[in-house]
Amino acid sequence: MRRALPISLGLLTLWIGAALAQQSPTAPLVLYAAVGPELTVHGVDVTHGTLTKSATARLPFPVQYVWFHPSKRFLYAAWSNGMQGDRHGVTAFQISEDGTLVPHGAPIELRHRPVHVTVDANASHVLVAYNNPSGLSVHTLKADGTLGQEIPQPAVVDGGIYAHQIRVHPSNQMVVLVTRGNGPAPDRPEDPGALKVFAYKDGVLTPRQSIAPNKGYGFQPRHVDFHPTQPWMYLNLERQNQLQVYKVMPDHQLDPAALFTGNTLDDPGHSKPAQMTGAIHVHPNGRFIYISNRASGTTPNAAAGGRPVWEGGENTIGVYSIDQKSGEPVRIQNIDSHGMHARTFTLDEQGRILIAANQTAVTKLEGSVEVRVPASLALFRIGADGKLTFVRKYDVETGGSNSLMWTGLLTPNNTVSTQRR
């Protein structure tokens, strides 16, 4: 059984910086987008801001989330036939030089719907989060990039309520399971949310913290991202439409008191019931952070003959400048996402473009006319000041239970060895 050597945050930062520095600005860039069970590859022309569809890989059931191997030679697609279904798993793909995907080894079957998947810092394990019942699992990742067996945990893992994301800190010594809870509904009270923090070593988790302000009520965390060089973790609160910052302590725990909390909306006083945040990503240079605001709720409208139409709200990508001394994010832009409900978005590794995946097709009223707004991929240029400029969008056909669930940008690399040293 191989033994993965520990990797320090400093070494990881140097490795990532060197890899980015060696990339040519003209290196091929590809976009992956998941609709239902199909994971489609698009060539990206950064100069002209265009996408060209090239190939599609098909999973057994709808894709839930995808994560890239650090070598950029493989990706791992989590799939499921639903929370009430009986088929769930993760499939590994090898990434060809042109970005096309080739199945790589046998898929692993999972016991519940995987809502999120990630790879640890030294590429020795895949970690999976489940939303219902809430929990996680850890699986070995072989040196050749194929998936292996599940790692038994020494004790029952506290999975909170409705896990929504699992992330490994770049030090490879801390795991954060983001458990969203659930907002109140007419037939049930609110379920509290929390951040479950674990010590992590060789695929084994040890409970360290449960951070739940106000016992988790009014606290619905969705996703986190880490600053590439500083001890700051950024968190978006889904239903509260807020952005928070937490300090990562030297012992690889979180200071339980948020350093900063701010609203993400232009007009929070007129927020609609279905208004929420989506994804969150720190720019590769650590100077900016991006967050999606999404609103696709509908309500019956008399002008539309009682048919449901969009209730309104803010569908934007928020841009924040990060104070490099304190970590405080200061909003400098909210720009229209040019669609409805940007569940995910992605930045390229050089921080040149951002592509938003507007997940859902929604009907809205323009005057007295009903207009269908399709799901779409919206492309933005990223300026030196971090701000976004809209270039164009590509409509994406969705239907039935299929939606635009995930998207990610990658420069394939078939020259890096995956052997851990």
Image: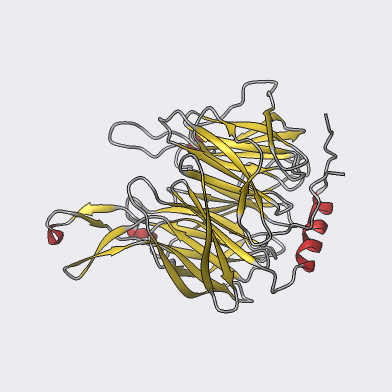
Q: How is the image coloured?
A: secondary structure
Name the residue at 73% across, 59% down.
Answer: 413
Q: Position of residue 366 (x, y in %)?
A: 23, 69
- Give left or right: position of 339 versus 243: left
Residue 280 appears at what percent x and percent y? 55, 55
Q: Quadrant of residue 176?
A: top right
Residue 70 is situated, as x and y percent measured from the top left of the image, at 72, 51
Residue 128: image location, x then y, percent: 60, 36
Quarter occupied by residue 351 = bottom right
Residue 71 visible (yes or no): yes
Give the number of marks: 0
Relative horizontal placement of residue 337, taking residue 52 as reference (left or right): left
Residue 165 visible in the snapshot? no
Residue at far bottom of view:
48
Residue at the top extreme, as displayed: 155
> Foreground: 36 or 236?
36
- Residue situated in front as seen by the camera: 157 or 81: 81
Residue occupying the point 75% across, 68% down:
23
From the image, which quarter does the N terminus lie in?
top right
Residue lying at the far right in this picture: please name it: 421
Residue drawn at (55%, 41%) of the image: 78
Question: Which quadrant is home to the C terminus?
Answer: top right
Q: Nearer the viewer, residue 162 or 90?
A: 90
Q: Judge left or right: residue 245 versus residue 338.
A: right
Left or right placement of residue 187 versus residue 10 in this view:
left
Residue 398 vertical placement versus 394 (above, below): above
As rendered, which of 65 and 344 lies closer to the eye?
65
- Residue beneath the point at 83% across and 41% down: 6
